[in-house]
Image (tube, helix red, strand yellow):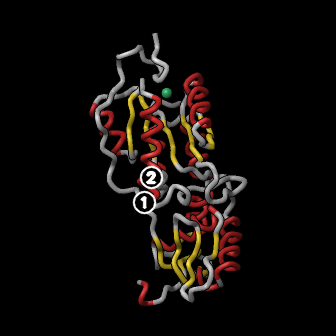
Amino acid sequence: MHSQNQYGAAEGTGVDRQPIVAAAGEFLVSPFASGLLEVTEKAAGARPGLLLVEDDQDLSVMLTGLLTGEGYDVVTASDGQRALQLAVGGDFAVVLLDRGLPFVDGLEVLVRLRRRGWTTPVLVLSAYGAPPDRVAGLDAGAEDYLTKPFDVDELLARLRALQRRHRDEAVLLPVAGGLLDVAGRRVLPDDGSEPVNLSARESKLLEVLARRPGQVFLRADLRSRVFGDAEGDNIVDTYVHYLRRKLGRPVIRTVHSVGYQAGVVRPERR
Ligand code: CA
């Protein structure tokens, strides 16, 4: 007999309630600013996006129903390759990631994403629950790790906690002419005028540049970091244009025949 609140576990067995320590770091960016959306761009306050990566169809369907009911905007991937594409191109508050996946293993997906500076919080949900498995998951860049079978209420609470923690670490990055409020996806101008709202992609592009002032980024590199591999390099030029139109030309410097870098920030902001 199954408890109503557990997935795949006979009552009283298997649910691991050991406290799990979140990995250090990776809490610098709001979940609402850490990804990008493929087609439409979400307004602040919209349903939080959740990427569910799970190859077990029954579990995926069950979780989709559950999480949608909890107010998440759920997007699913059933293999590691698709997960990579969606994670880079999407705008997610949180990712729920299985480990054993076709094509690219779940932890390998995570390592590749973290290596390119992707900061969306990840909860690994896996049947591999021994301490070394958890350590591997956290070391790969997961913020949290829950073992299958799991308690549904605990899963939901952990997802809420992850987003809270992430949001609390919102940052302001100096940019030419103001401060980029990463969590709020807006620039607060130095002259005290009204904040300038940015789309998810505009904010992400400016964030990548502003986090490494002085570094010159190749267009292909920016395209890969911000827009995903499905796009052409021209998309970078398009979004540089959008940002300059909103924030003034100096916000991004063109480095001729190389790429782009952040515009020069006022000395006292450095
Ligand atoms: Ca699996």
- 82 and 134: which one is in front? 134
Q: Position of residue 213 (x, y in %)?
A: 46, 77
Quadrant of the snapshot with the C terminus: bottom left
**Cα distance, mark 2 to mark 1?**
6 Å
Please name the residue shown 45% across and 32% down the image: 153
Please name the residue shown 70% across and 79% down the image: 245
Which numbered disc covers residue 23? none
Specify the amino acid type for callout 2: Arg
241 on left or right of 264: right
Specify the amino acid type for callout 1: Asp
- 185 and 115: which one is in front? 185
Q: Position of residue 44 (x, y in %)?
A: 62, 59
Please name the residue shown 54% across and 37% down the image: 80
Q: Residue furthest top?
A: 1
**How many circles with numbers are drawn on the protein?**
2
- 94 and 98: which one is in front? 94
Residue 219 figure quarter: bottom right
Q: Position of residue 186 (x, y in %)?
A: 59, 71
Query: Does dot 1 land on a helix, a strand or a loop?
Result: helix
Residue 158 figure quarter: top left
**Label 1 packing within 10 angstroms: few (<14), some (14-19), many (20+):** few
Please name the residue shown 69% across and 64% down the image: 235
Q: Are marks 2 and 1 in contact (CB under 8 Å)?
A: yes
Give the residue pinned by disc 2: 164
**Label 2 packing within 10 angstroms: few (<14), some (14-19), many (20+):** few
Give the residue pinned by disc 1: 168
Query: Does dot 2 land on a helix, a strand or a loop?
Result: helix
